[in-house]
Amino acid sequence: MNRNGKPDKFLLDNQDYNFIKNDKHLGKHVILLGLAGSYSYGTNNENSDIDIRGIALNQKSDLIGMTNFEQYVDQKTDTTIYSFRKIITLLLNCNPNTIELLGLNPEHYLYLNQIGEELLANRSLFLSKRAVHSFGGYADAQLRRLQNALARDSYPQQEKELHIFHSVRNAMHEFQSRYSSFENGSLNLYIDVSGNPQLETEIFVDADLRHYPLRDYKNIWAEMNNIVRDYDKIGKRNRKKDDNHLNKHAMHLIRLFLMAIDILEKGEIHTYREQERHLLLSIRNGEFQKEDGTFRTEFYEMLTGYEKALERAARETALPDEPDREAVEAFVMRVNRKVVTDEI
């Protein structure tokens, strides 16, 4: 990075990144490299690490042979480069960690070839109402991290149960695409008065599953159980260390809502948050945290406002229910055909 916190055009010339040139899955197969994390959001500070994300084409042997390349991870440089096949699947699901790679500021792309530019030109093909649940799921995870680390003994049980309910319900939307013949009506979740003397309210479930694969059933319950277990974990806090993490989680929670609202309202991906940069940095710097480590009422009021804005955007969006799979498939076939015929 240069003095202004912008990417140095010679960053990739550092020998720490030699693996990009030398690895057999990367090199000439790379079509896009860009900054990720705080530099891409505009929320970096003097302690921020440089994260890089990228995309590399699958080779001919991956497409018509017996090899299978999914991604390359270099932990030393915080670099992850996805295969073309894998990134397409993630983008179709509007995965927040990868869809943001299509909306970077131009100066945050470290490398782009013609196919990479074509992918960016077709970014709108991947946008759909799936963003509601994909971004909502990630936001729920950030909110859980916040709540789990705070002093939950004084946290109202009914309110905690409500947050667990929303988290599990959000996960259920993902089950439809990952498990056999799963529909929302198969498991009906609701909150009611608890018969447990230790709880005021409790989440209940009505199940209606017949001739259902046991393994899928086991995985569904395991995921729900993990969400409930995460809420119930109690551990001692390292205040100084944890407060930094808490404020970072709080910042990303708001950022996720901002990106999702842009996608639904405008059909656009804006990873760098120019207009909200000051707000996000103020959250990261602890300006919304009280002395006891909890968050001020203003933060939760802001969060509620963005939740309502996302709900409104979801109702009014012009985006389709599903991404344009036919157009995406045509694009993927066009690219892979060039690979197979040695045009690339």
Image (cartoon, rainbow, N blue to C red):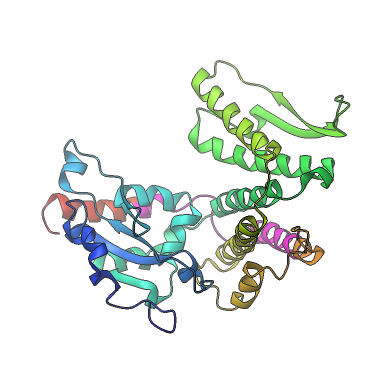
Tell me where residue 176 appears, x and y as whole percent: 54, 36
Q: Residue 249 versus residue 33: which sits nearer the camera? A: 249
Residue ID at (30%, 73%): 11
Q: Residue 163 versus residue 144: which sits nearer the camera? A: 144
**125 lies above or below 175:** below
**102 lies above or below 187:** below
Residue ID at (60%, 78%): 275
Magenta: main secondary structure: helix
Quick check: 74 left or right of 322? left
Q: Splitting the image into 4 quarters, where does residue 3 fall?
A: bottom left
Residue ID at (62%, 64%): 251
Q: Can residue 331 be found in the magenta stretch?
A: no
Tell me where residue 201 appears, x and y as whole percent: 85, 34
Q: Can residue 307 be found in the magenta stretch?
A: yes
**Name of the residue lying farthest toward the top:** 211
**329 lies above or below 205:** below
Total residue callouts:
0
**79 lies above or below 192:** below
Quick check: 156 left or right of 288? right
Tell me where residue 325 appears, x and y as whole percent: 40, 50
Tell me, yes or no, if residue 263 can be seen here: yes
Q: Which residues are magenta?
A: 302-328
Q: Where does the C terminus fall, quadrant-wise?
A: bottom left
Tell me where residue 123 appears, x and y as whole percent: 41, 63
Q: Where does the N terminus fall, quadrant-wise?
A: bottom left
Residue ID at (16%, 57%): 22
Tell me, yes or no, if residue 213 can be seen here: no
